[in-house]
């Protein structure tokens, strides 16, 4: 073979080899670039400030160049699990709405390990004195609200894949403390200064009394119907008070044990059983013309279920760790006040007719049938919905 032909063959082979190397290098570079983009430093910066008077604000600054463009057209508003982002510019919503929603929905603010529900708003960043305005302003989300009474420490976490990011925490008029976090990593607890924590026990007691009462009136329709079911069949005061006492003792026990973590059932189990307890009491009112002694034991058992329901609500609201017992007792007293108010209102409405011969036919049976129908609907909805 001529020499020039051999050289041409070698050149072709080397060219093919270089082409393969180039494609492999391009693929590796693409994978590295994508991996780097998924763990970009500085996608967000978080600063939490705790103010005198018992309020907090958490400002999350987003770096625009690290957020990929949206796919499709986004709405000019952003609605998160905590509600819409207030004051958000429509142009910012269209550009960053997908990222801001995911950021808020994946983040948790907790005081003494109890998550809180903040108000979500947008802040227009202002340039520092002497600095020119930025070509593209960095979106800033503000999560703000009241510090729970008696709280001792705060933690922050986001599950969104934003790479390593800084968290600055500061009590008002103090130098910030910095932490570097990864996605899904909860920050170290930050101690709140005494000047920013509303620690008055009278305020805690009153707050949880009100929360317990309003959980019955007007918010606790299922508990209202259960108490009305007890009221309808008990013509005399003493049997009624016996049932209410059994119910109170039972739900106090499970409320305390559940909040202390001794017992616990999933709401997917507790809530349908509470609805079924309403159905049972109402149906028994229709089928049994008089109150039986065994009713007290059943009411006690149903009270255990309702106590777990109260605990589920109280877990969402949160209890201050330093005043845990006071808040727990106050909430329970508020619940009792709400139940007694329901009984008092029912007595005012139909109490004077309870000794009439037509009372059972015209009041107890129709009202119990209505209560049973509502409880049955809730049972089906909570089981299958």
Image: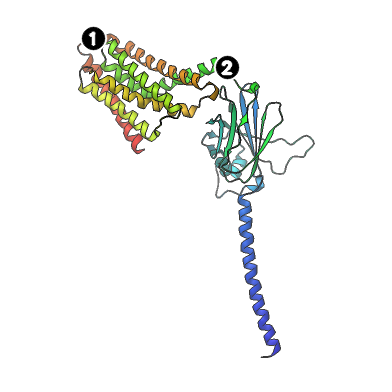
Q: Residue at x 36, y 23 (%)?
A: 223
- Residue placed most toward the observer, 299 or 20: 299
- Residue placed most toward the observer, 128 or 307: 307
Q: Can residue 372 be seen in this view?
A: yes
Q: Which residue is drawn at 80% across and 36% down?
A: 130
SS category of the residue bearing label 1: loop
Q: Is residue 245 left or right of residue 360?
A: right
Q: Which of marks 2 and 1 is nearer the N terminus?
A: 2
Disc 2 + disc 1, Cβ < 8 Å: no
Q: In this view, does 50 lie to the left or right of 311?
A: right
Picture quadrant where residue 373 is located: top left
Picture quadrant where residue 108 is located: top right
Whether 373 is drawn above or below 233: the answer is below
- Residue placed most toward the observer, 106 or 359: 106
Alpha carbons under labels 2 and 1: distance apart: 49 Å
**Label 2 environment density (alpha carbons within 10 Å; few <14, some 14–19, many ≥20):** few
Q: In the image, residue 8 lies at what x, y percent?
A: 68, 83
Q: Is residue 228 left or right of residue 78?
A: left
Q: Quadrant of the C terminus?
A: top left
- Residue placed most toward the observer, 356 or 10: 10
Going by the picture, which residue comes out furthest to the front? 262
**Label 1 environment density (alpha carbons within 10 Å; few <14, some 14–19, many ≥20):** few
Whether 303 is drawn above or below 65: the answer is above
Give the number of the disc on residue 200: 2
Count of picture labels: 2
Q: In the image, residue 61 lies at what x, y percent?
A: 65, 39
The residue that label 1 is drawn on is 355
Give the number of the disc on residue 112: none
């Amino acid at each position: 073979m001529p020499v020039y032909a051999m050289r041409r063959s070698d050149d072709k082979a080397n060219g093919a080899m270089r082409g393969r190397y180039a494609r492999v290098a391009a693929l590796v570079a693409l994978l590295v670039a994508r991996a780097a983009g998924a763990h970009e430093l500085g996608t967000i910066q978080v600063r939490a400030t705790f103010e005198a008077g018992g309020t907090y604000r958490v400002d999350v600054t987003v770096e625009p160049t690290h957020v990929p463009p949206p796919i499709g057209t986004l709405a000019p508003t952003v609605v998160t699990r905590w509600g819409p982002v207030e004051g958000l510019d429509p142009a910012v919503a269209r550009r960053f709405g997908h990222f801001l929603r995911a950021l808020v929905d994946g983040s948790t603010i907790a005081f003494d390990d109890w998550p809180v529900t903040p108000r979500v708003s947008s802040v227009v960043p202002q340039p520092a004195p002497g600095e020119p305005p930025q070509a593209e302003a960095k979106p800033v989300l503000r999560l703000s609200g009241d510090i729970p009474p008696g709280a001792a420490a705060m933690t922050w976490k986001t599950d969104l894949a934003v790479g390593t990011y800084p968290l600055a925490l500061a009590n008002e008029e103090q130098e910030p403390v910095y932490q570097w976090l990864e996605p899904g990593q909860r920050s170290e607890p930050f101690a709140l200064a005494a000047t920013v924590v509303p620690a008055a026990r009278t305020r805690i007691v009153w707050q949880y009394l009100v929360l317990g009462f309003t959980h019955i009136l007007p918010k606790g329709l299922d508990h209202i119907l259960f108490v009305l079911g007890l009221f309808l069949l008990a013509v005399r005061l003493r049997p009624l008070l016996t049932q209410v006492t059994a119910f109170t003792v039972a739900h106090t026990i499970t409320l305390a044990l559940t909040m202390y973590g001794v017992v616990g059932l999933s709401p997917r189990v507790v809530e349908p059983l509470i609805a079924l307890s309403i159905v049972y009491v109402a149906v028994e009112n229709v089928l049994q013309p008089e109150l039986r002694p065994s009713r007290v034991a059943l009411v006690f058992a149903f009270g255990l279920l309702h106590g777990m329901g109260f605990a589920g609500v109280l877990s969402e609201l949160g209890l201050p760790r330093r005043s845990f017992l006071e808040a727990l007792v106050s909430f329970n007293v508020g619940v009792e006040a709400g139940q007694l108010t329901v009984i008092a209102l029912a007595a005012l409405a139909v109490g004077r007719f309870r000794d009439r011969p037509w009372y059972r036919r015209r009041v107890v049976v129709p009202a119990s049938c209505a209560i049973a129908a509502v409880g049955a609907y809730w049972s089906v909805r909570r089981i299958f919905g």
